[in-house]
Amino acid sequence: MGWVTDHAPTGAELNACVRCGLCLPECPTFRLTGKESFSPRGRLMAMSAVADGVVEVDESFAGIMDSCLQCRACEVVCPSLVPFGRAMEGARAELAAQMPSRTRAARHLLVGRVLGSPGLLRMATLAVKVGQKVGVGRVLPSLLRRGFAGIRPITPVAVEPGSTYRAVGERIGRAGFLTGCVMDVWFSDVHAASIAMLQRAGYDVVVPATQTCCGALAAHDGDVKDTQRLAERNVVAFANVDVVAVDSAGCGAHLKDYEHWAGQAGELFSKRVFDITELIDQAIASGRIPKSSVDRGPVAVQDPCHLRHVQRIVDAPRNIVRAAGYSPVEIDPDGRCCGAAGMYSLLQPELSRQLGAAKADQVRQSHANVVASANPGCEMQLRSHLGKGYEIVHPVELLWRAVQEDDR
Amino acid sequence: MTLIGDLVEILGPDRVLSEPLERYLYGTDGGVARGEVIVVVLPETAGEVSDVVKAAKRHGSPIVPRGAGTGLAGGAAPAVPSVVVSLTNMKDIEIDLGNRTAWVGPGVINLDLSKLTRSSGFHFAPDPSSQSACTIGGNVANNSGGPHCLAEGTTTSHVLAVEIVTADGEIVLLGGPAPDPIGLDLRSVVVGSEGLLGIITRALVKLTPNPLAVRTILAGFATMEDAVATSSGIVARGVVPAALEIMDQKMTRAVENFVGAGFPIDAGAILLAEVAGHPAAVEAEARLVEQVANENHVTSLRVAADEVERAKLWLGRKSAFGAVAQLAPDYYLHDTVVPRTQLVATMQKIYEIAERHGVLMLNVFHAGDGNLHPLVAFDASVEGQLDIVHAAMEEVAKVCIEAGGALSGEHGIGLEKRDLMPLLYNEADLDAQARLREAFDPDGLFNPQKVLPAGSRCADLGRPIPTGAWL
Ligand SMILES: Cc1cc2nc3c(=O)[nH]c(=O)nc-3n(C[C@H](O)[C@H](O)[C@H](O)COP(=O)(O)OP(=O)(O)OC[C@H]3O[C@@H](n4cnc5c(N)ncnc54)[C@H](O)[C@@H]3O)c2cc1C
Ligand code: SF4
Ligand code: SF4
């Protein structure tokens, strides 16, 4: 039967792979298992096997695709410039279309419905909040408990949809702020810090009320319709801003990829999307945000895959940490995935656990007890694997705190 | 019991891969050949390898050892339906800094060893361009080289001992820590044996001190002739740089497109030269490189300012084969060696052959030791293309051998170059090699039909072939 959707991996995408194997050592799942079927080259070859009619889209194909973290570390080192992330989203779209009845139903519900609906998400949040108060974390099965342990104590939502925050000092433009789905309610402190720093960077910040979930999880899951629907809504919601500011690396990576989901309008939209660390780094470089002269000690910098491998942003978070008066400590020269990877920690618990534990060890060896991470998924994963004694924050939060302290 | 049943008993179900799609993924390596895989196993100890070999032998199944599958000659692609033994999970490393050696498992990735020893001031010298991915077991099996083998020698100069599992399933140690162990040097026989004589389960390798100073020079030339003349000129003046690498224009452009390291894309060819060692010597040798380049009409010259720039230039050079995919989906390359004095003439002939056959030829090579990698980029899905490429490349091989060269500098013979062996070796040579193989593996269990073309063994012709034997 081969492929059945318009989103399938294309011949050009698959043929670009010459099977040199240079991506293998960069792939976290290959490193753990040593198996071709857990490697980028193997996954591409499996897709080619479907395209060439050697195999069908079946359980064994699905297994090979499902174990991919979509961290895209493989893309960075590929000299043939294989667009692996795009090809994998295509393969997931095929799985969703050809094997709708697999365990995908439950995921679909969560991804498409709950995260796309503020009402449902708030209900889930309320449950978490109550849980945190009464301490149900301890009675949950160990796997869920781990996820639970990663969630920040929930504070009241700070950002009201529809509001505008004025630039502090000279105004350089208008930024539309993406609140995201999980970020909005579970990470409102990060939003507060991001908006405050954007104001200081010279942006009027608006929070379009009609915006919605970025659609990354739906795309990773192969849900083409939902992904397109969410993308089209956001393109309209952010039509009237100069830049779209995003404080979740995973969401930003996906917004920068809207050309695949919302056509030409999406492509134009993508050009205006910036991770918050990029915008703040620019403001530091141009002197609009001052560098702190207080020495605040070491901070371990964790590179979210969707920042480092997909958006190729490496220096910005370090510059921000430095401007806040901390000394950034490198924990992983290879920038290996922490195993959070969106829904991965729920769907592939064992691989996720091994990667999370390895990342936590790297942090412990750095002797820093503050970790800067620019992505909510990574933050939760780190918190649940590091346990007590470590603070995990967004780099912009560190800067905002420093700015407030220095102002005093 | 079935073969797979036996293997599961030895390794457990998780390390025996028998699903059709999983097996399919092991049917090929970095080359163009594809073969059939009966089952894939992932042992973790020499004992397990031994048990696997015994089981396969009982069932009369051939065995193909496999590292990272970056080989370019089809060495890890089964020629007949085989059990693939993947060594990727044998990754133990025991470093002995006092003796500047390390015992390493065959699945250790080449660059991982150098990274691990970097802070102690050492590295593993053989640096194939695939070093970020290929395994030491694969390096030993192919006697791999790399840009820096010009001064340091190929893998065989850096292996003191190997532990192998023989066709009987016996675990034997060949060589040892002493520089020249007594008796026949069987270690040297196994290095470069391409998985035909046994499965390497451990190797004792030398660690090389990192140089005190390094200078990397990128020179652009209007013509390939000038670039080659410069590289030969440098060696002729008695300097052996750490590396001397040349890329032609098409290759340089593809590479630059990936790394953006500032390679001069208008140059007809570029020379990447590196000198390393004592700071004073490095200074003098760098001056000489520049001087010889000037004598040969260099059009641009740049010295890498720091380690970051240097790393980027090398990343560019080492990505060359992969970058070819930007031009066409498949490539086929040779790995011939010609005497340095014949380089210019041979290169001209190679480009002529390409033109005559209408194929897209690129060149990137170790100029210092005359190890060419003429490479054709093509689309195998176009009917008849592969035949045209094979025909052109056979001529290329002939031209190189006529120039007094060899068939493989470092990538091995495997399946891809097997039938070209008679161009270089006569019957007696081939017979001797076939008999050597028989001495290790009388039934031809390991990597059958590789390296030696059918009929290499003179006696084969008249002898009935026993069942269960693969030649
Ligand atoms: C981009 C690229 C660049 C390259 N550059 C170079 C270069 O500069 N120099 C160079 O020499 N080569 C180069 N190669 C070729 C290849 O990387 C080397 O030959 C490498 O040593 C192969 O290692 P591997 O682990 O991938 O082995 P594989 O490809 O898996 O196997 C290679 C051969 O070794 C045998 N083998 C593997 N492991 C064992 C073992 N444990 N015991 C017994 N036999 C075994 C296999 O049966 C096969 O015949 C390059 C390849 C690529 C894709
Ligand atoms: S690095 Fe690129 S071309 Fe090479 S095997 Fe990986 S995906 Fe394929
Ligand atoms: S995206 Fe990450 S997990 Fe998936 S193949 Fe690439 S490196 Fe491996």
Image: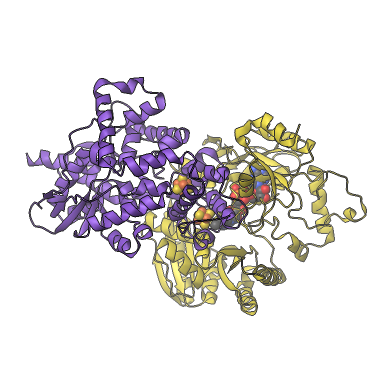
Chain colours: A purple, B yellow
Determine the residue positioned at 45% across, 33% down: A349
x, y percent for residue B62: 75, 44
Determine the residue positioned at 43% across, 72% down: B265
x, y percent for residue A323: 19, 46
Determine the residue positioned at 35% across, 20% down: A139
Is B107 situated left or right of B326 in this image?
right
> Count of labels shown?
0
Examine the rendering and report whether any part of residue A294 can be seen: no
Q: Is residue B390 above or below residue A86?
A: below
Is B133 situated left or right of B384 in this image?
left
In the rendered image, which quarter is residue B49 located in?
top right
Q: Quadrant of the N terminus of chain A?
A: bottom right
Q: Is residue B344 above or below residue B320?
A: below
Is B133 situated left or right of B77 in this image?
left
Examine the rendering and report whether any part of residue A250 can be seen: yes
Q: Quadrant of the C terminus of chain A?
A: top left
x, y percent for residue A238: 22, 56
Q: Is residue A197 above or below residue B148?
A: above
x, y percent for residue A154: 22, 32
In the rendered image, which quarter is residue B335 located in?
bottom right
Near-viewer residue (B47 or B104): B47
Q: Residue furthest front?
A: A101
Near-viewer residue (A132 or B420): A132
Determine the residue positioned at 49% across, 72% down: B249
